[in-house]
Image (cartoon, rainbow, N blue to C red):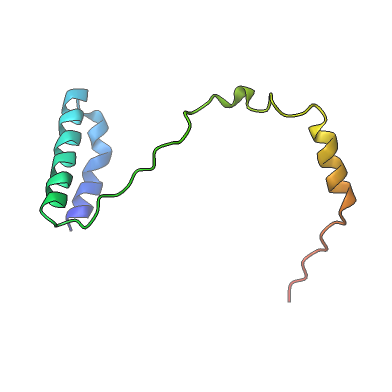
Amino acid sequence: MMIDRLQEVLPHLQYLPPETQEEIANYIKFLEQEAFARGRIKELPHVAASAEPWEDPAGAWSDLPDDMFEELDKIRHSNPPTPPIELP
């Protein structure tokens, strides 16, 4: 099948010069758009765009309250532990 041939070749594309990689990517995109325009493809796959730009996670917890861990411990200790699962 053609998809098998493509899957065999794709890992080797990284060894091609960047200009050739760009040319191949543009050609594949062109073929996809042509197939869509001619009705061979019902809809193009949708690539979800991120609603927010990526943010470095190093400071992601900086806006959390200082007593967050104490609050989580209170919640954890206020609930009884889950009983062990008995296997048949």
On the image, which quarter does residue 19 sit in? top left
Farthest residue to the bottom: give it. 88
On the image, which quarter does residue 71 sit in? top right
Give the left or right position of residue 6, taking residue 56 as reference: left
Relative vertical location of residue 52 with respect to residue 45 in this rendering, above or below: above
Relative vertical location of residue 62 with respect to residue 3 in this rendering, above or below: above
Name the residue rendered at 19%, 29% in the picture: 22
Give the left or right position of residue 49, taking residue 2 as reference: right
Name the residue rendered at 25%, 48% in the picture: 7
Name the residue rendered at 85%, 35% in the picture: 70
Residue 10 at x, y = what percent?
24, 41
Q: Quadrant of the C terminus?
A: bottom right
Relative vertical location of residue 18 with respect to residue 30 in this rendering, above or below: above
Name the residue rendered at 25%, 50% in the picture: 44
Q: How many marks?
A: 0
Farthest residue to the front: give it. 51
Residue 1 at x, y = what percent?
18, 58
Residue 87 at x, y = what percent?
74, 72
Q: Nearer the viewer, residue 24 or 76?
A: 76
Residue 67 at x, y = what percent?
83, 30
